[in-house]
Image (tube, helix red, strand yellow):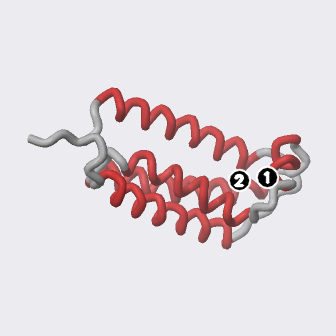
């Protein structure tokens, strides 16, 4: 189980990542950041998958039950809302496949966290 300080750090990191995903999703296509990102040899779907995997992974390390479910449903809802938001961002477009990549990333991040949080690393023997 994570300490209170570790939980706070994970939640802070999650909030920072969330802000980056929101801003990155709504920037106009001609922005400097998106033009630089488009030069990387990574597909748009891979970027969605990785971002949402990270958004799911961090809270899944220490949250359980209803709290975790709310985070996961909210994260997917955010992905859907941001896709619709892109309809109003110059040069951006709505894409159902991006939502699919977001959802797949959430499932992958959740699964990775379940495996990771049960590893005996850092645990002391009773």
Q: Position of residue 63 (x, y in %)?
A: 31, 47
Q: Quadrant of residue 102?
A: bottom right
The residue drawn where x is 80% and y is 61% is 41
105 lies above or below 26: below
Front-lying residue, 44 or 72: 44
Determine the CA span between mark 1 and mark 2: 6 Å
In the picture, the quarter occupied by the C terminus is top left
Residue 5 as seen in the image, left or right of residue 82:
left
The residue drawn where x is 28% and y is 40% is 122
Residue 85 badge: 2
Task: Tell me, yes or no, whether the two marked residues, 1 and 2, touch with CB atoms within 8 Å.
Answer: yes
87 lies above or below 16: below
Q: Position of residue 68 (x, y in %)?
A: 34, 52
Instruction: Identify the residue position indicated by label 1 in the image.
Output: 88
- Identify the element where label 1 is drawn: helix
In the picture, the quarter occupied by the N terminus is top left
The residue drawn where x is 29% and y is 38% is 2
Q: Where is residue 14 in the image (x, y as percent from the top left)?
A: 50, 40
| Neighbours of disc 2 within 10 Å: few (<14), some (14-19), many (20+) | some
Residue 120 badge: none
Residue 84 as seen in the image, left or right of residue 67:
right
């Amino acid at each position: 189980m994570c300490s209170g300080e570790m939980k706070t750090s994970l939640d802070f990191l999650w909030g920072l990542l969330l802000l980056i995903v929101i801003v990155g999703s709504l920037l106009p296509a001609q922005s400097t950041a998106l033009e630089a990102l488009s030069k990387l040899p990574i597909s748009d779907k891979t970027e969605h998958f990785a971002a949402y995997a990270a958004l799911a992974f961090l809270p899944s390390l220490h949250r359980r039950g209803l709290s975790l479910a709310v985070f996961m449903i909210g994260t997917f809802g955010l992905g859907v809302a941001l896709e619709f938001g892109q309809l109003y961002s110059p040069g951006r477009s709505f894409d159902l496949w991006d939502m699919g990549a977001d959802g797949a990333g959430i499932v992958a991040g959740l699964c990775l966290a379940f495996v990771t949080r049960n590893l005996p690393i850092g645990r002391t023997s009773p």
